[in-house]
């Protein structure tokens, strides 16, 4: 089987054939988008920032009242089993010669199957959540796109910072699909959401950053954004990379006046953003500091994956 053939998934505690039937048609995730998901990068069989992803998943389960019985250790073991089964856990040296495994991992949790109709019919509290893990070979952002940069439009959908679900990564993605369709119809790559009062929020699958002078700025969590893991990493490492950090309310005119801008995601990494609504951001070209930040993040991912494979020190 070639690496990442997609022949296996990890479903409710065991590996299963990805091509077979799995979910009951009454599963709430299918019927209502009643679920959560996390997408992470894995390298050498090591899921980068897994603890942070699982912490966010647990918080979402609490918010939606999903009964996820699997422990974090069990989920981690399931991911590991799947990466091995899919040939995506190679270390490239030592006892596992061959290419280095590089993968995208998705963990999906749905409320589970329920025969009765309705949003909260009798018995919903007792459902055991369905847990699925999938893995694919990591597909890096094309070099041509990194050289050109992403073009965005402002979505007509507005984000409500007061919504209790603003920071929950649910499987209900219709708003995000609609916004991406708006971008595609305008000949752009992505869409940016604004809040009800016109502040910048985030992109359809990424957080937003801009560089102005020596400041790295990003909208705060109160702008109805998801606390992305790459965002968290940048806030923690920016000073080491020569930039001061600012979590501040931003408006489109400030983005357009910035020196550079970029979007961040766990799998895509740091990708330059060069225009909004047909107007250039800065020079309208990817900037050198964006490229340096992307390279620093990739180097860190590689170092973390290698460090995680080192033997535990003796007592």
Image: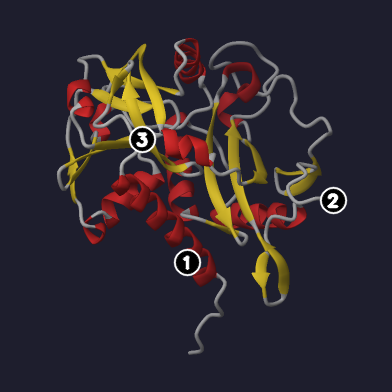
x and y percentages locating residue 201 in the rendered image: 29, 26
Q: Quadrant of residue 239?
A: bottom left
Q: How far separated are the C-alphas under marks 1 and 2? A: 28 Å
Label located before the other in sequence (1 or 2): 2
Q: How far separated are the C-alphas under marks 2 and 3? A: 36 Å
Tag 3 and tag 1, C-beta contact below 8 Å:
no
x and y percentages locating residue 118 in the rendered image: 58, 11
Residue displayed at 43% across by 25% down: 204
Label 2: which secondary element: loop
Q: Choose between 237 and 117: the one closer to the eye.
A: 237
Label 1: which secondary element: helix
Residue at the spot of label 2: 1
Which numbered dot is residue 207? Answer: 3
Residue 38 visible within the image: yes
Residue at the spot of label 1: 303
Tag 2 and tag 3, C-beta contact below 8 Å:
no
Label 3: which secondary element: strand
Residue displayed at 48% across by 90% down: 315
x and y percentages locating residue 32 in the rendered image: 58, 17
x and y percentages locating residue 280 in the rendered image: 28, 24
Q: Badge 3 local density, few (<14 within 10 Å), some, or many (20+)?
A: many
Residue displayed at 68% across by 77% down: 94
Q: How far separated are the C-alphas under marks 3 and 1? A: 24 Å
Q: Badge 2 local density, few (<14 within 10 Å), some, or many (20+)?
A: few
Q: Choose between 236 and 144: the one closer to the eye.
A: 144
């Amino acid at each position: 089987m070639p690496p990442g053939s997609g022949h296996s998934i990890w479903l409710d505690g065991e590996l299963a054939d990805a091509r077979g039937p799995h979910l009951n048609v009454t599963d709430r995730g299918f019927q209502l988008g009643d679920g959560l998901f996390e997408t992470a990068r894995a390298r050498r069989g090591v899921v980068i920032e897994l603890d942070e992803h699982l912490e966010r998943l647990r918080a979402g389960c609490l918010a939606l009242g999903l009964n996820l019985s699997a422990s974090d250790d069990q989920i981690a073991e399931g991911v590991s089993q799947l990466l091995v089964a899919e040939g995506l856990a190679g270390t490239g040296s030592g006892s596992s010669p061959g290419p280095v495994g590089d993968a995208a991992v998705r963990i999906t949790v749905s409320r589970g199957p329920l025969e009765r109709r309705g949003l909260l019919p009798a018995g919903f509290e007792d459902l055991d959540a369905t847990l699925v893990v999938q893995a694919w070979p990591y597909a890096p952002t094309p070099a041509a796109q990194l050289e050109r940069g992403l073009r965005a439009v402002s979505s007509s959908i507005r984000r409500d910072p007061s919504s209790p679900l603003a920071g929950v990564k649910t499987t209900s993605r219709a708003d995000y699909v609609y916004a991406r369709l708006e971008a595609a119809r305008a000949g752009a790559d992505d869409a940016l959401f604004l809040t009800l009062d016109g502040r910048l929020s985030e992109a359809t699958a990424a957080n937003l950053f801009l560089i102005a002078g020596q400041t790295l700025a990003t909208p705060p969590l109160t702008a109805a954004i998801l606390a992305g893991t790459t965002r968290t990493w940048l806030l923690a490492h920016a000073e080491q990379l020569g930039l001061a950090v600012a979590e501040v309310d931003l408006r489109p005119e400030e983005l357009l006046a910035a020196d550079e801008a970029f979007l961040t995601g766990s799998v895509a990494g740091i990708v330059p953003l060069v225009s909004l609504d047909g107007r250039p951001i800065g020079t309208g070209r990817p900037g050198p500091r964006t490229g340096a930040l992307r390279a620093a993040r990739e180097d860190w991912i590689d170092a973390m994956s290698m460090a995680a494979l080192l033997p535990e020190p003796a007592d």
